[in-house]
Image: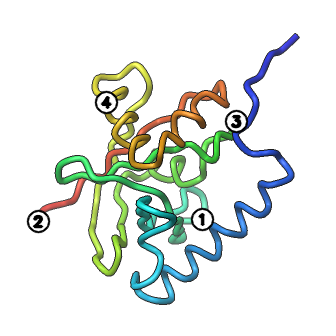
Amino acid sequence: MDQRPSPPFPRALMPALHAFTRLHRFLYRSTGGRIGRRMTGSVTSLLLHTTGRRSGERRTVALAYTEDGDSYLVVASNFGQERPPAWLLNLQADPHAELNVGRRRVLVTAQIVMPGEDDYERLLSVASRATHDLFERYRASTARPIPVVRLVPDHH
């Protein structure tokens, strides 16, 4: 019998979580970053703008992040679900993206760090500490490898 880890959120709660993330993204965008950078307590968020891998259209998602040196770290947890988030697939197809960090706009290049790669455990630990160990709980709830994405500012 397949023994799957239990998700961190009951399935019935997922529509509410997705509605919250849509509202959060709307507020962040419509206020130019004046509202939305702080999610809850000390957890900070950014807007990640990618290019849709199939549509070619601009896609925007609000994500919790932390800084690591000059880079921004986000985790492709997708709430601990079995499928990776669409934004990760977009970055795999085109690693060039743009961020809104509060009112600042930053052009970045994504570096996807997978479990087992150098620095993965350190990066996940840094990101997880910034979210009160939420990413560690997500990792424990899925058999899917959860990448850490380092968003490195483009210095031109």
Q: Which residue is mark 1?
A: 55
Pair 1/4: label in front: 4
* Residue type, numbered disc 2: His
In 3D space, how far apart are the residues under numbered discs 2 and 3 (Cα atoms)? Answer: 38 Å
Q: Which residue is mark 4?
A: 122
In 3D space, how far apart are the residues under numbered discs 1 and 4 (Cα atoms)? Answer: 35 Å
Query: At 45% from the left edge and 51% from the top edge, which residue is drawn?
Result: 91
N-term mark: 1 or 2? 1
Check the image and report above or below for 68 versus 54: above
* Residue type, numbered disc 4: Arg
Give percent across and percent down for residue 2.
83, 15
Mark 4 burial class by Cα count in 10 Å: few <14, some 14-19, many 20+: few
Check the image and report above or below for 27 versus 2: below
In 3D space, how far apart are the residues under numbered discs 4 and 3 (Cα atoms)? Answer: 23 Å
Q: Which part of the image, by quadrant, shows the N terminus?
A: top right
Q: Nearer the viewer, residue 61 or 20?
A: 20
Pair 2/3: label in front: 3
Q: Which residue is mark 2?
A: 156
Q: Which residue is mark 3?
A: 82
Left or right side of 143 for 155: left
Check the image and report above or below for 126 versus 42: above
